[in-house]
Amino acid sequence: MMPQTQADSPREMSLRPESSPDASTAFFEEAYRVFSAAQAAAGSIERTFSIADYEVRLQFAGPALMSATTTALTHLAARPSDTPDLTVCIWDSASTGVPMIPPAWPADAYGPHGMIRGFNTERFQTIVQRANNSLNMLDHDRNIALYWIPDVARVTYYETISPLRTLLFWWMNRNARQLVHAGAVGTPDGGVLLPAKGGSGKSTTALACLEAGFLYVGDNNVLLNDDQRPTRAYSVYNSTSLHGANLEERLPRFVPMIENLDRLERQKAFGFLYKQYPTQMVRSLPIRAVLVPRVTGYRDTEISGSSAGTSLNALVPSTVLSLPGAGRETVEILSRLLEPLPHYTLKLGTELSQIPRTISDLLRTSR
């Protein structure tokens, strides 16, 4: 993060003194003033979304980042109120013409995920994404977050399908909602949680169920409540991403929705589901069971009993490793949430139409 005239790599930033107790507050206030200047230059736009029963207001300086930030959230659009739970300020320097302030930390302050040593406290959380030099900073006391990027052209495809993921994880974690790398689909009888590492069939399972008429919460990221029972899965994004190999054969109906067919040699296929399936996008579902998908190569899909430990092994690594600041507390939360639920292995067959029927039968008998 730097003025537009400086080099782009965080390690090329000029050195700054080590942080003082007030350094985080001072930097946040200065960056917030830059956002206000960018709004004055490019115009102010607001959008409101209801995420996991909380009102999240996005404030933009100009329109440049709107599409990249809101498309995946469209299904959660809500009427604004005067008292949002979280406000996120979003801007870039290229379109607004307003340069960012220099970093207030030395070049060796970057930890895992780009977390800034000395600027992650009880009140503030801060990272700079090395992939595109974007700033994510959250003030828990005021429930205001900042997202800045030098240029909208630097937004990665992963940020487009899961916008503001780090900021939402941080804030929701303090408000009894845990972001997890998992899918969730269901019927009027309830839903199933689908935890698995990439390539295990999680997204394929969710999309096969969506095509069969299931209700859809998400297939890569969902929020789980930690303040009441039963456990509910809350929707965050209406996007999907999956490996493009043999996509035309496996899920031909979704090929027209794919946004990056010309880049599948270096990216997973991704698209947005809300336009095609608006009535099946739901804000939440009660979770009746945890199903860990496993590709078998056989024709038929089967379910067998499993354990909470197996489900945790499928859920914890990809969740913890992908979320800045996640650690032991996250593991403890996930253990507490999953322990009371029934657990199964979903042995995925090659005849995809069997997958939703098998899950529907399980939900019907587990009421």
Image (cartoon, rainbow, N blue to C red):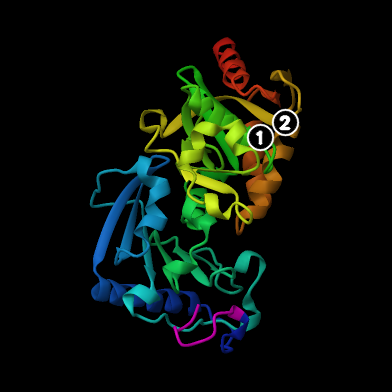
The correct choice, above or below, for 232 with respect to 260 in the image is above
Residue 117 in picture, x, y percent from top left: 61, 73
**Residue 294, numbered circle:** 2
Q: Residue at x 44, y 32 (%)?
A: 284
Of residues 117 and 318, the one nearer the viewer is 318
4 in the magenta segment: yes
Badge 2: how crowded within 10 Å, few (<14), some, or many (20+)?
some
Residue 57 in picture, x, y percent from top left: 33, 54
Q: Which residue is labeled 1 in the image?
A: 201
Residue 358 in picture, x, y percent from top left: 62, 16
Of residues 331 and 249, the one nearer the viewer is 249
Q: Residue at x 67, y 45 (%)?
A: 331
The correct choice, above or below, for 211 with respect to 173 in the image is above
- Drawn side of residue 131 relative to residue 68, left or right: right
- Drawn side of residue 3 relative to residue 367, left or right: left
- Drawn side of residue 104 relative to residue 98, left or right: right
Residue 230 visible in rendering? no
Residue 31 in picture, x, y percent from top left: 40, 76
Which amino acid, by three-letter code, is at mark 2? Answer: Arg
- State yes or no: discs 1 and 2 in contact (Cβ < 8 Å): yes
**Residue 341, numbered circle:** none
Name of the residue lying farthest toward the top: 365
- Location of the C terminus by quadrant is top right
Secondary structure mostly seen in the magenta stretch: loop
Q: How many marks?
A: 2
Q: Residue at x 52, y 56 (%)?
A: 157
Of residues 359 and 328, the one nearer the viewer is 359
The magenta segment: 1-10
Secondary element at tag 1: loop
Q: In 3D space, how far apart are the residues under numbered discs 1 and 2 (Cα atoms)?
A: 7 Å
Which amino acid, by three-letter code, is at mark 1? Answer: Gly
